[in-house]
Amino acid sequence: QVRLVESGGGLVQAGGSLRLSCAVSGRTASMYAMGWFRQAPGKERESVAAINWSGRNTYYADVVKGRFTISRDNAKNTVDLQMNSLQPEDTAIYYCATGRLYGSSRPFVDEYDYWGQGTQVTVSS
């Protein structure tokens, strides 16, 4: 059974930082592309960042480029999202997900099959 568990969310002031972590079990994460997504109230789920199976290629949404960094530790079967210079518009539930086997860093929700339960990130102004 594949399970993803996110951690690290919370409340932070604008300009602050948070580091999200996603622990994967039941699947060798190093063989799969991984992604971070977010969903704000009343909005569709959107891609934030993605990383290919080897960790050599990444994707970032324009709104987070230069502020967020995705990384993976294949030995620990985890994927992290370092978020700096957070703004109120970053407030959302953040989800990690597993993508394609030996896949590239792609932002398309439909290409991800297993999802975590999400972790709330709230940025106050």
Image (spheres, grey):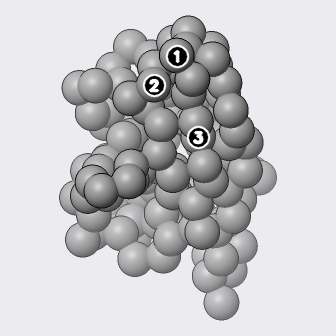
- Above or below, comparing residue 11 to residue 102 in the picture: above
**What is the tally of numbered marks visible in this picture?**
3
Q: Where is residue 33 drawn, in percent x and y? A: 42, 57
Q: Point out the tag, 2 or 1, that comes first from the N-terminus.
A: 2
Q: Quadrant of residue 118?
A: bottom right
The residue that appears at 48% across and 63% down in the rendered structure is 97
The residue that appears at 32% across and 32% down in the rendered structure is 60
Q: Amino acid at mark 1?
A: Ser
Neighbour tally class for label 3: few under 14, some 14-19, many 20 plus, Cα within 10 Å: many
Residue 68's disc number: none
Visible in this render: residue 26?
yes
The span from disc 2 to disc 1 (Cα, nearest Å) is 6 Å
Q: Where is residue 73 drawn, in percent x and y? A: 67, 44
Q: Which residue is mark 1?
A: 125
Q: Which residue is mark 2?
A: 88
Q: Where is residue 85 drawn, in percent x and y? A: 51, 12
The residue that appears at 46% across and 19% down in the rendered structure is 87
Residue 121's disc number: 3
73 and 18: which one is in front?
18
Q: Point out the tag, 3 or 2, that comes first from the N-terminus.
A: 2
Q: Where is residue 123 drawn, in percent x and y? A: 56, 27
Q: Amino acid at mark 3?
A: Val
